[in-house]
Image (cartoon, grey):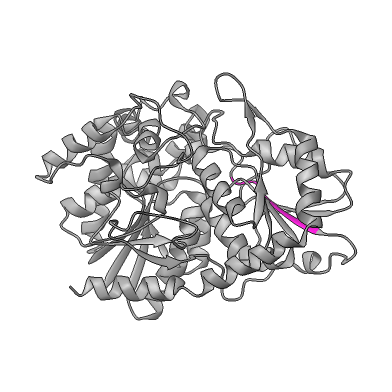
């Protein structure tokens, strides 16, 4: 069986990190597995794991989203891949102008993303031309590679392509993306008239004689829908037709942290700081996590702690010239090994980071940079396994700051109160009682035979 893995296109490592353990399990069961459409940082991790990354013939896959500017476009136009796949820079440029989602502008961006419909409205899916072009490019990869089954991690364009290509679709999602969930901001009532790409998606679906949808979440559920986590951490109504598989966390079998981190002194707590991507788009956006790094530098430089800063193969944010003396920068560390080595994780609230901390039994302090991450942070805090601080935004929701004294106080609180560690270990035991990647692979394999 040939399994093609697709995910939402983005520069972070969160989605490939949850896809890779399932892909590895399927490969070990004798199946052929490939990935589709990942940008450079994620491609490196996928290649290290031994998998091929197939790039759709869509110009937006040739430029990291944080470099969709004149410099990034010129760099892409000069690349060997563009000459090979597009026949030259002019052809690439003409197609780029045709497919770029002009509806994706800074004025639409906000850290307060209410649900999956709102999220994809801010990411360009209000443009029918963009959605149609992306679906066509993804469908070409699926058919050219002769995929038998598509395994998707919340990319609605890929899910449309799978249905249009008549490929079985196995979906792996978070609970707050399910159409029966309360969305990302479940603790407040949503405002009226939020933007939604549903009418655009229905226009594309009609072109393939596929039935319409009412919510974007309907697209990213499949013939089989697996939910990461547990009902306690990731609740859904009993009517939702899903199967929980527990944590999906990735680390190479031989993944070890560098010797200099293993040899850190045992007289001071070790804090692992993983801020996420400093910048996700070509311009400043509410999703950016550079604010996490800068706040921790200000709050922890004078504390009696050792901070390991990793950036997931991403460069340090602009403007950071020298780290404090008690900081060590490692571009990449194996997540599970580092989580077990440290006394506290500080991160941006990505779902994979939350799961890594819970799976490892490590207390967390979360600084969520958007509402989906705040949802994750609230779930972790609700089970007593950590604390969170929501950055304070300006009137436009773009510029953010983290109260330094509050950050410093919460670091001391979590490190000094053993209940956080005890609760993290309790949740670790619960998570590990689920099947995880092996069970997800078994269920996907079983559904593929039907």
411 and 314: which is toward the camera:
411
Q: Is residue 271 magenta?
A: yes
Q: Looking at the rendering, in which quadrant would you find the C terminus? A: bottom left
Which secondary structure is most common in the magenta stretch? strand
Could you tell whether 218 is left or right of 210 in the image? right
Q: Position of residue 327 (x, y in %)?
A: 81, 50
Which residue is situated farthest in the left direction here?
A: 209
Residue 439: image quadrant is: bottom left
Which residue is situated farthest in the bottom direction here?
A: 29
Residue 339: image quadrant is: bottom right
Q: Is residue 417 above or below residue 63?
A: below
Residue at 41% across / 46% down in the picture?
Answer: 9
Residue 88: image quadrant is: top left
219 and 288: which is toward the camera:
219
Q: Is residue 43 above or below residue 74?
A: below
Q: Is residue 295 above or below residue 225?
A: above
Q: Position of residue 156 (x, y in %)?
A: 30, 46
Q: Which residues are magenta?
A: 270-276
Residue at 76% across / 38% down in the picture?
Answer: 406
| Residue 334 in sight | no
57 and 299: which is toward the camera:
299
Residue at 53% across / 49% down in the picture?
Answer: 376
Q: Is residue 445 above or below residue 182?
A: below
| Residue 264 in sight | yes
Q: Looking at the rendering, in which quadrant would you find the N terminus? A: bottom left
């Amino acid at each position: 069986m040939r399994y093609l893995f697709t995910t939402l296109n983005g520069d972070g490592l969160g989605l490939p990190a949850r896809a890779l353990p399932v892909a590895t399990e399927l490969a070990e069961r004798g199946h052929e597995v490939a990935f589709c459409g990942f940008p450079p940082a994620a491609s490196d991790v996928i290649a290290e794991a031994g998998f091929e990354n197939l790039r759709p013939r869509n110009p937006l896959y040739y430029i990291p989203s944080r470099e969709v500017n004149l410099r990034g476009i010129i760099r892409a136009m000069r690349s060997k891949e563009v000459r090979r796949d597009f026949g030259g820079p002019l052809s690439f440029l003409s197609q780029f102008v045709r497919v770029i989602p002009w509806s994706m502008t800074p004025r639409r961006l906000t850290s307060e993303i209410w649900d999956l419909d709102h999220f994809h409205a801010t990411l360009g899916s209000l443009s029918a031309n963009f959605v149609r072009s992306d679906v066509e490019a993804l469908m070409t990869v699926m058919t050219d590679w002769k995929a038998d089954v598509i395994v998707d991690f919340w990319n609605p364009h890929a899910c449309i392509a799978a249905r249009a290509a008549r490929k079985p679709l196995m979906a792996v999602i978070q609970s707050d993306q399910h159409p029966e969930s309360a969305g990302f901001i479940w603790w407040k009532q949503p405002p009226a008239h939020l933007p939604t790409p549903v009418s655009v998606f229905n226009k594309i679906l009609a072109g393939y004689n596929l039935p319409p949808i009412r919510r974007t979440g309907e697209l990213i559920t499949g013939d089989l829908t697996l939910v990461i986590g547990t009902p306690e951490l990731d609740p859904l109504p009993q009517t939702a037709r899903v199967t929980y598989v527990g944590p999906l966390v990735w680390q190479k079998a031989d993944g070890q942290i560098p010797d200099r981190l293993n040899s850190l002194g045992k007289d001071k707590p070790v804090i692992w700081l993983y801020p996420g991507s400093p910048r996700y788009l070509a311009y400043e956006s509410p999703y950016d996590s550079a604010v996490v790094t800068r706040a921790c530098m200000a709050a922890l430089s004078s504390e009696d702690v050792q901070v390991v800063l990793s950036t997931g193969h991403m460069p340090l944010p602009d403007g950071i010239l020298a780290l404090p003396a008690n900081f060590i920068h490692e571009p990449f560390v194996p997540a599970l090994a580092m989580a077990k080595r440290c006394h506290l994780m500080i991160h941006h609230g990505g779902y994979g980071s939350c799961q890594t901390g819970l799976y490892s039994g490590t207390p967390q302090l979360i600084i969520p940079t958007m509402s989906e991450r705040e949802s994750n942070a609230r779930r972790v805090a609700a089970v007593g396994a950590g604390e969170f601080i929501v950055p304070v935004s300006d009137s436009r929701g773009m510029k953010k700051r983290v109260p330094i004294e509050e950050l410093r106080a919460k670091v001391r609180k979590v490190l000094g109160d053993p209940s956080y560690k005890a609760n993290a270990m309790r949740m670790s035991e619960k998570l590990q009682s689920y099947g995880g990647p092996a069970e997800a692979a078994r269920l996907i394999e079983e559904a593929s035979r039907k």
